[in-house]
Image (cartoon, helix red, strand yellow):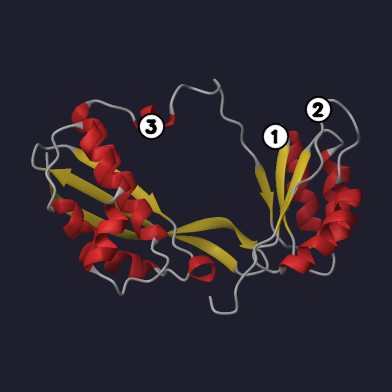
Amino acid sequence: MKVVRCEILEVDIPFKLTFKHSLKERAESDSIFLRLRSDKGDTGWGESLPRAYVTGETPQEVVRIIRDVLLPVLAEHPIQTWEEALELASGLEKEARKKNPDLPDRIGAARCALELAFLDLAGNHFRRSVSDIFGSRKREWVEYSGVIGSDSRWKIAKSAIKMRLGGLQNIKVKVGSQDDREKLRLVRRLMGSSADIRVDANGAWSVSDAIGNIQPSSNSASPASNSRSRLMTMRAWHRSPNR
């Protein structure tokens, strides 16, 4: 089985609501969809969501890297088994970098779209599931979580109430502004003591900022002590000035 055709689609998917956080305000999702076809008639689909403000990858650059760098490496290797497909997917970026030493450090969005499509293609051909890679099934259900962006108190309250009425118990709150503590207290009050709340600063904090914010925010937003509760976890990205 060999990849013989690739179709790349750039799709802007509009949101029903504008979403805000410390790095960006977005009203649509700039997505890349990719379809591979093999010489045996199989098809595989992949997708990625490049975010220039996160990794520096633009949709246009993702399309270029897939078309000119990664796809030629993939297309030159016919595969005979599912195991060969996994090996090729695993070593795709390494081989591409050998042939293209000037590749940017971060090409994750491009690799994601192509790798997903290739694994889907190989899985369809060899009648195997990608879930085989991850071992036995861990649980029988999928747990959804909600996300609350940086917005007015009214919109934050409205989102929290809707999520509680919808039965969500895991909530991520976007932080990185001056009113973070008040925002977290409001979400905690509306979500109740049993909900798990985590925060995401989206690069707005340095490591020292994160350390300074963790304890005060945890005290104001952590759930009450009971067997179902866990303290809020906090994430902050450390960004080098050179990136």
Of marks 2 and 3, the one in the foreground: 3
Q: Position of residue 136 (x, y in %)?
A: 46, 22
Q: Which residue is mark 2?
A: 228
Q: Earlier in the sequence, mark 2 or mark 1?
A: 1
The answer to whether any part of residue 20 appears in the image is yes
Residue kind at label 2, given as amino acid type: Arg
- Residue pictured at 54% horizontal, 56% vertical: 15
- Residue pictured at 50% horizontal, 61% vertical: 28
Q: CA distance from mark 2 to mark 3?
A: 31 Å
Residue kind at label 1, given as amino acid type: Gly
Q: Position of residue 48 (x, y in %)?
A: 40, 54
What SS does tag 3 mark?
A: helix
Q: Earlier in the sequence, mark 3 or mark 1?
A: 3
For label 3, the crowd category at 10 Å Cα-Cα, with few meaning under 14, some 14 to 19 and many 20 or more, is few
Of marks 2 and 1, the one in the foreground: 2
Q: Position of residue 233 (x, y in %)?
A: 75, 47
Q: Quadrant of residue 123?
A: top left
Q: Which residue is mark 3?
A: 133
- Residue pictured at 38% horizontal, 67% vertical: 59
Question: In the image shown, does 85 or 163 lie closer to the viewer?
Answer: 85
Of marks 3 and 1, the one in the foreground: 3
Q: Give the residue at the far front of this rendering.
A: 98
Q: Quadrant of residue 122?
A: top left
The answer to whether any part of residue 180 appears in the image is no
Question: In the image shown, does 9 or 114 lie closer to the viewer?
Answer: 114
The numbered mark at residue 166 is: 1
Q: Is residue 236 left or right of residue 12?
A: right
Q: Earlier in the sequence, mark 2 or mark 3?
A: 3
